[in-house]
Structures are given as C-alpha cells and as structure tokens.
Amino acid sequence: MIDNITIVNSWNEWDPLKHVIMGRADGVCIPAPEPALDAKVPEDSDMRGQFGPRTKDTVDKANQLLDDFSNILKKRGIKVDRPTPINFNQKTSTPDWETKTMFGCMPPRDVLLTVGNEILEATMSYRCRWFEYLCYRPLLKKYYNQDPKMRHESAPKPRLTDADYRKDYLSDKIGVQKKIRVD
C-alpha cells in the first residue's frame, strides 16, 4: 500500500474525467419474468415471456460499442477499468425467491456511485440483478488495496419477496395514495 495514491475521489460530474468503470456485455441475458420486470416489458413486446442469453450478434455489437468508447477515453488519457462478468445464464435464488437467469454487468452506474473517496454500492430492485455486485468486487478490492483513503459501503439488500411488489404500481388507474400506501 502506498500512502499518497488517490484512486477514488469524485465530488461532481463536471470536473474532467480521469478514471471510469465501463461495463461489459459478455454473457448478458434477457431476464426471466419477475415482479419488478413485469411493468417494464410492454404487453406487445417480442421479449415478453422470453429469457436467456442474448444473441451472439447483439452481444458482439454491444461489446464493440463499449470497446470503441473505451478506446476513445483511453486515447484522451482516461483510465478505464472493466468489471469481471460471471455466468449470468444460471438459476439464482435466496430463501425468498428464485429466478432462472441473471442480467449482466453492462451498466456500472446502476450499481456503483462515487461520492468523494467512497464508492456506494446500490442494491437492485430486480432479482436478476441481485448478485451483479460480484462483477465489481475485484475492482473495488484493487482500489481498496491501492488507496488507503478509499471507502466502500454497501446498501442493505431488500428481500424482494412477492409481497414487496404491487402489480399495478405503474398504472395510471391508481392514485398516489395507493402507490405510497404501506401494507
């Protein structure tokens, strides 16, 4: 450990970018149906009811875009780190639920937020993203070992039981009072 190295430090989104984590599309899946996703997938979508690995050509295209953007940033002197994908095409569960696939690690900003010298790890409302944090832990460990001032906090994970979701929550047919009611 070197005492004067700062790896993690960001107070706003307007200063020049120096270091970023860019996602990967490797192994990304269409998530299996679950309560949080039901409202997000339109009734007439071709994806409704489908799940599993995305096609190789869509993964390749996404990775090409991510790699190209990464190379642009690197040419401008910005350090780019990438997460370590896991096998997202597998069943995962907790004692409260089970889902047939996970999602991926393409959008790091959904999971990680830097405030000063601290990286805050968010929890996900989708069951398919419950273990996504594992993709970023190797990077967080590296930053922690290199930067003595770096802090890492992880938000408590919700249980995500079926009772935690309201099927009609996004409907225009229910009022605000029903949306904020705690049963």
Image: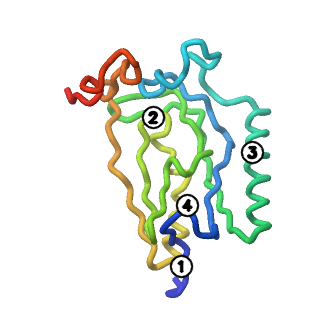
Label 4 and label 1: CA atoms lie apart by 18 Å
Q: Position of residue 83 (x, y in %)?
A: 61, 54
Q: Nearer the viewer, residue 107 or 88?
A: 107
Dot 3: what SS? helix
Q: From the viewer's perspective, is the residue at label 2 or at label 4 nearer?
A: 2
Q: Earlier in the sequence, mark 3 or mark 1?
A: 1
For residue 63, which numbered disc appears in the image?
3
Q: Position of residue 14 (x, y in %)?
A: 57, 65
Q: From the viewer's perspective, is the residue at label 4 or at label 3 nearer?
A: 3
Residue shown at 36% from the left, 15% from the top: 173
When the figure is inspected, residue 29 is found, relative to residue 142, above or below; the finding is above
Q: Position of residue 12 (x, y in %)?
A: 51, 65
Q: Earlier in the sequence, mark 2 or mark 4?
A: 2
Specify the amino acid type for callout 4: Pro
Residue that mark 1 sits on: 6
> Do callouts 2 and 4 mark residues in contact (Cβ within 8 Å)?
no
Label 2 and label 4: CA atoms lie apart by 22 Å
Total number of numbered discs in the rendering: 4
Specify few, some or many for label 4: CA neighbours under 10 Å numbering under 14, 14-19, or 20 or more: some
The answer to whether 183 appears left or right of 41 in the picture is left
